[in-house]
Amino acid sequence: MAEFGASFIPNMVVARCRDGQWGELSLKPTEAMPMHPAAHVLHYGSECFEGLKAYRSPNGGAHLFRPDRHVARMRASAEHLLLPSPPTTMLEESLRVMVREAGDAIPDYPGSLYLRPCLLGLDPNIGSAGKPSQGAIYFVLASPVGDYFAGGVRPLRLLIDDENMRATPGFGQVKTGGNYAAALRHIQRARRNHNADQVLFCPGGDVQETGAANFLLIRGNELITKRLDGTILPGITRDSLLQLARDAGLTVTERDFTVDELLEAAPHGEAALSGTAAVLTPVGTLIHGSQEITVGDGNSGPWMTRLREALGSIQSGHGADPHGWRVSV
Ligand SMILES: *Cc1c(COP(=O)(O)O)cnc(C)c1O
């Protein structure tokens, strides 16, 4: 399997919006597309995206994981950016088209087909910094991906950054390239200076999330994670894991918590990152200033292992689907 995200199925589904009116979905080759050099997205960052997975079902068909939630979040992101929002029915249909188009290219579980819906503002006018783009393009890339954990689950090293913000308050809930651009230099510095895998953004001591995944802490029988206050991305994996944690008898608390609280809980607790790509990846080490704190025994703890398996059994199609998260295509 090629590197994650760098190989695509031959076609993508595309729709154009002109003067606020969406046209039909159509299939086009996944290749360079013409765009005016003054396009709004290239200058003013009018862009949002989604990331979700389709799985090959044990009975031979294929299913998507919670596509309704991804569609709703795409529309919320578009509205925050004042981009023309594609209708719900069109977004849902675009995902089905791509899964059918991929056909046999969907790998067997634990592989999957990663879908990347994108929306870009296209108005060709560099004078429109303060105006929303009326023209837009929507497309969905599809990339077959292998087992993220091939070679075993490796616990991550996270640098706690208690100064910088990943995103501006209120915009952290929007899945837009600008937030990634803003976080990149902090992540690079953490890699270079601390051999860290990711940065846990904790501005002013408020534990938020990493550059592309939500952060979950377990202490005793309680799962603690930042509340959805606009600073963090409302992860669909996060939401699913919170539900599975409640099902398993954990107390789930969505609230603000501090770096001090985290560092105190870490040695006898569990921590992990959640997101579509990595599902639930254990955090083995927290780096804070000149200190390195081992989380639990440094490996995936019993609760996180159990939650990852519970989610995997639903996503793979092998287990029951008590919450109706699988949608057959
Ligand atoms: C996409 C994303 C997540 C994870 O969301 P999922 O819906 O679980 O994939 C978390 N944080 C950020 C910043 C993200 O962009």
Image: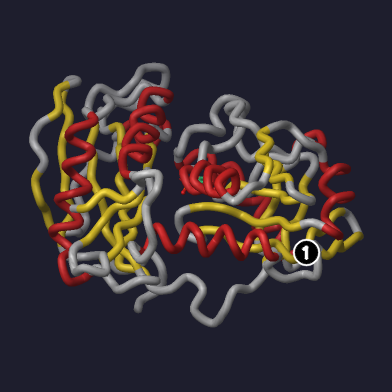
Q: Can residue 207 be seen in this view?
A: yes
Q: Is residue 192 left or right of residue 147?
A: right
* Residue farthest along the bottom direction in this orientation: 151
Q: Which of 177 and 197 is in front in this view?
A: 197
Disc 1 is placed on an element classified as strand
Q: Which residue is drawn at 34% across and 45% down?
A: 324
Q: Which of 162 and 70 is in front in this view?
A: 70
Q: Residue at x 30, y 46 (%)?
A: 117
Q: In this view, does 192 lie to the left or right of 233?
A: right
Q: Which corner quadrant holds the N terminus?
A: bottom left
**Dot 1 crowding, Cα within 10 Å, few <14, some 14–19, many 20+:** many
Give the x, y percent position of residue 272.
Answer: 65, 56
Q: Which colour scheme is used?
A: secondary structure
Q: Residue 289 sits in which quadrant?
A: bottom right
Q: Residue 83 sits in which quadrant?
A: top left
Give the x, y percent position of residue 99.
Answer: 20, 57
On whether ligand 1 comes within 8 Å of the CB at mark 1, the answer is no
Q: Is residue 180 visible?
A: no
Give the x, y percent position of residue 148.
Answer: 47, 70
Q: Is residue 211 above or below residue 119?
A: below
Q: Mark 1 points at which residue?
A: 285
Q: Which amino acid does label 1 sit on?
A: Thr
Q: Is residue 239 left or right of residue 40?
A: right
Q: Which residue is drawn at 54% across and 45% down?
A: 238
The number of callouts visible is 1
* Residue farthest along the top direction in this orientation: 131
Q: In this view, does 82 lie to the left or right of 199?
A: left
Give the x, y percent position of residue 55.
Answer: 30, 62
Q: Residue at x 61, y 54 (%)?
A: 273
Q: In this view, does 74 lie above or below 21?
A: below
Q: Is residue 80 above or below residue 54?
A: above
